[in-house]
Image: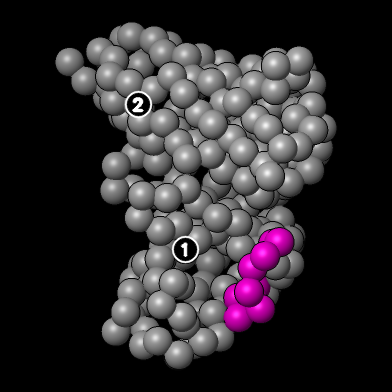
Amino acid sequence: EVVMTQSPATLSVSPGERATVSCRASQSVSSSLAWYQQKPGQAPRLLIYGASTRATGIPARFSGSGSGTEFTLTISSLQSEDFAVYYCHQYSNWPLTFGGGTKVEIK
Amino acid sequence: EVQLLESGGGLVQPGGSLRLSCAASGFTFSSYAMAWVRQAPGKGLEWVSATTTSGGSTFYADSVKGRFTISRDNSKNTLYLQMNSLRDEDTAVYYCAKRISSSGGSFDYWGQGTLVTVSS
């Protein structure tokens, strides 16, 4: 099983600042990596797939990078609606696995 | 507009069974792989099961293998999850998710989820 490790678990950021979330895979997943945003009481929303491709309707302030085992989600200038939990997800190998999540909270 | 509407959740005793359904609309259901993902209260996301476009191939997390069965009826645009021998640790919100392509990939659309509570 590919273990996905996210860091940090919690990130405190002021509105307008940059936020960076890291995700490490226990073995290479190539570029088969997605990022999701989840707000309380809501279903997850796809932000990034293929490690760096923004999903339909996702603002340009969200960007993804990396390949192999090291990945990064960057939010260039945090807006109030961006405070949420973010998950990485690998779909290269069975079983499909998710990172434990990173909560981005208001500083 | 893509819509996924889950139903069938509820309270069930340990050892019991439930069948979840996911009614899909707004896309050509038979052209996309589909999956179930769950989230225990206050916890992260856990993939449960997936199926190919025809339903001919199915995949399961070890935690549910032998107890859960995923299936689909492309004539009814509906995905199912038959859950047997339920355990306390199966308590979660279960999401139906559409995969981004016929061959798999990420989950580009999710339903709102249905809560399954396993408790005596």
Q: Residues within 10 Å of mark 2 (few under 14, many from 20)?
A: many
Query: Magenta stretch: dominant SS?
Result: loop
Q: What kind of residue is marked 1?
A: Tyr
Residue that numbered label 2 is attached to? B116
In front of the other: B24 or A18: B24
Between the C-alphas of marks 1 and 2, the distance is 23 Å
- In the rendered image of this protein, does residue A28 appear above or below residue A42? below
Q: Position of residue B66 (x, y in %)?
A: 51, 14
Marks counted in the figure total: 2
Left of A4 or right of it: where is A70? Answer: right
Question: Which amino acid type is marked by label 2?
Answer: Val
Q: Which residue is mark 1?
A: A86
Residue drawn at the location 59% of the way across and 35% of the way down: B4
Q: Quadrant of the C terminus of chain B?
A: top left
Q: Quadrant of residue B11?
A: top left
Seen as rendered, the residue at the extreme bottom is: A17
Do the numbered discs 1 and 2 sit on residues whose CB atoms are within 8 Å? no
Label 1 marks which chain's residue?
Answer: A
Expressed as whole percent of the image width and height from the top left, the position of residue A90 reads 62, 52
Q: Residue placed at 64% from the left, 68% from the top? A: A58
Q: What is the chain identity of the residue bearing mark 2?
A: B
Image vertical order of residue B48 relative to residue A99, above or below: above
Place of residue B76 in the rendered image (x, y in percent of width and height, measured from the top left): 70, 16
In the image, which residues are magenta?
A55-64
Residue visible at 31% across and 10% down in the picture: B15
Given residues A85 and B57, the one toward you in this image is A85
Q: Is residue A59 magenta?
A: yes
